[in-house]
Image (spheres, grey):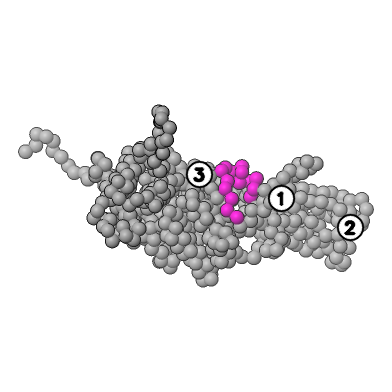
């Protein structure tokens, strides 16, 4: 409102006549949904120095910025979950801040998990032996072993490398029921020395997480649906969807249902992109059949195959394991965004932390998968393990490449945020000129970054906001229409050198 002057004097006014800069929206924020070891903020016991679980973040999207912070809240690696390894691979490959939604915390789960155990028979065949039970419920206990070695009236009991000697079944000194092991509890109801041998705990596990658990509820802010409230999420993945895969039709339907829901959310929210895994153990033909089975057609998702082999840093006795590649791949998205820009296809990049792939694909095998939008991860002699595909799952050639979709995601999100000032302004030609000015300024920076094709701005993009788009009947509806066209840079997927014999410049 113009100022009112009633007293003589000199007045200085500030008038906003400049452009309103549009800041590019982030392209790299990832959101992981799955299973973790723990899911609570920790406090430290001043007497023992042990971490004590505090406020729970179970089924709540929680921001973490590095691997150390992830460990402090979610407990690090554990058997029976791929998400910790996926997050570790994400940060190893250049990932930045991300959201974690833990649907189940295996070490803190009191209701949904059972503890592994093993019954150890008496050496004499008479009386009662011992029972060893894992202290932590879940599949991790299935890897534990108990070794018994009798030495006369006493015996040695070992859990892994932790051995206790001179134990007896009589209460008093060295009573086996008084011995405390870090990972198992030994029953105190035995009546006879246990029989020699190595005994493996079994039966540990969790109730399977259902498709409904993964999909969640937007009002309760749980599962994948709970991510809707987070406007900065751009990449969504769910590696633990594959935990316990048994090849059954029911499990396949579960995967398809959850991945369908992820894609639907990304399309509805417009500014998100889904990274999908394939099931384990597939050969090239089976991977093709899987792609045809799920039958997705969307430019808001990409699929990666096969699984990658990584070091097993959990409590499992294995030294390596295979896992879904999505976490490592999303880290590569972040790395490319930071070093080149979101306009570069996240392909021909080394998968850091991958020791091998589940199947070494041939060029011919990839030739059957690439046209279907299955992005292969391949091992090349002397060049490491690389992502060797950059396609979405869309059948529309205009949206074939991941970087094209992500370009429109970033531009769309940036314009939606940066042009909020236009709402409720007088819808006249003066406003149209300001909108064109700000949009052209923003798109010029996108073009200068290399994201748009063209030697000049006129070749790279156009912005139209005029009487043709906004006649009186449109303005009467309270609408302002701005049309923007962009020429995205597309990856050189097929590089062709044409060779021929040449006789030289003097040849007739």
Q: CA distance from mark 3 to mark 2?
A: 54 Å
Label 2: how many Cα within 10 Å (few below 14, some 14–19, many 20+): many
In the image, residue 411 lies in the stretch drawn in magenta: no
Task: Kindly identify the residue that appears in the image at 44 percent across and 66 percent down.
Answer: 294
Residue at 86% x, 59% y: name it: 188
* Label 3, residues with CA under 10 Å away: few <14, some 14-19, many ≥20: many
The circle on residue 172 is: none
Q: Which residue is mark 1?
A: 53
- Give how far across and how far down residue 184 sits, in percent: 76, 55
Residue that appears at 89% across and 63% down: 191
**In the rendered image, is residue 11 in sight?**
yes
Give how far across and how far down residue 309 sits, in percent. 53, 51
Q: Viewer-nearest of labels 3 and 2?
A: 3
Secondary element at tag 2: loop
Marking on residue 95: 3
Residue beneath disc 2: 169
Q: Residue at x 43, y 54 (%)?
A: 271
- 136 in relation to 442, above or below: below
Q: Identify the image quadrant of residue 124.
A: bottom right
């Amino acid at each position: 409102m113009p100022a009112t002057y009633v007293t003589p004097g000199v007045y200085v006014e500030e008038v906003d006549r400049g452009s309103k800069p549009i800041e590019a929206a982030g392209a790299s924020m990832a959101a992981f949904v799955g299973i973790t070891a723990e899911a609570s903020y920790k406090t430290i016991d001043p007497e023992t120095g042990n971490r004590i679980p505090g406020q729970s973040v179970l089924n709540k999207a929680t921001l973490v910025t590095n691997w150390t912070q992830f460990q402090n809240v979610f407990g690090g690696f554990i058997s029976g979950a791929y998400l910790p390894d996926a997050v570790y691979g994400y940060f190893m490959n250049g990932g930045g801040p991300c959201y974690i939604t833990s649907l189940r915390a295996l070490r803190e789960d009191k209701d949904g998990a059972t503890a592994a155990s093993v019954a150890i028979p008496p050496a004499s065949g008479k009386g009662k032996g011992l029972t060893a039970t894992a202290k932590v419920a879940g599949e991790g206990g299935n890897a534990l072993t108990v070794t018994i070695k009798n030495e006369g009236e006493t015996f040695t009991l070992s859990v892994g490398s932790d051995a206790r000697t001179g134990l007896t079944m009589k209460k008093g000194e060295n009573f086996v029921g008084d011995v405390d092991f870090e990972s198992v509890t030994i029953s105190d109801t035995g009546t006879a020395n246990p029989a020699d041998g190595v005994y493996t705990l079994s039966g540990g596990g969790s109730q399977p997480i259902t498709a409904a658990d993964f999909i969640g509820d937007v009002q309760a802010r749980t599962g994948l649906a709970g991510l809707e409230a987070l406007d900065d999420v751009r990449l969504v993945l769910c590696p633990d969807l594959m935990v316990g895969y048994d090849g059954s039709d029911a499990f396949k339907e579960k995967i398809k249902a959850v991945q369908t829901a992820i894609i639907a959310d990304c399309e509805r929210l417009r500014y998100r992109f889904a990274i999908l895994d394939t099931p384990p153990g597939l050969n090239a033909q089976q991977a093709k059949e899987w792609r045809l089975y799920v039958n997705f057609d969307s430019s808001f998702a990409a699929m990666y195959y096969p699984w990658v082999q990584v070091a097993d840093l959990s409590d499992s006795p294995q030294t390596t394991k295979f896992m879904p590649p999505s976490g490592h791949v999303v880290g590569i998205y972040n790395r490319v965004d930071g070093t080149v820009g979101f306009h570069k296809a996240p392909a021909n990049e080394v998968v850091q932390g991958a020791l091998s792939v589940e199947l070494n694909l041939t060029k011919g095998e990839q030739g059957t998968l690439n046209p279907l939008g299955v992005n292969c991860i391949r091992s090349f002699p002397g060049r490491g393990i690389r992502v060797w595909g950059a396609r979405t799952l869309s059948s529309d050639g205009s949206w074939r490449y991941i970087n094209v979709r992500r370009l429109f995601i970033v531009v769309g999100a940036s314009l939606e945020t940066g042009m909020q000032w236009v709402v409720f302004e007088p819808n006249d030609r003066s406003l149209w000129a300001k909108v064109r000015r700000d949009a052209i300024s923003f798109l010029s920076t996108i073009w200068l970054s290399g994201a748009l094709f063209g030697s000049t701005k006129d070749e790279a993009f156009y912005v139209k906001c005029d009487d043709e788009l906004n006649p009186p009947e449109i303005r009467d509806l309270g609408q302002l229409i701005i049309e923007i066209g962009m020429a995205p840079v597309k990856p050189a997927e097929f590089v062709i050198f044409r060779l021929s014999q040449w006789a030289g410049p003097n040849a007739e």
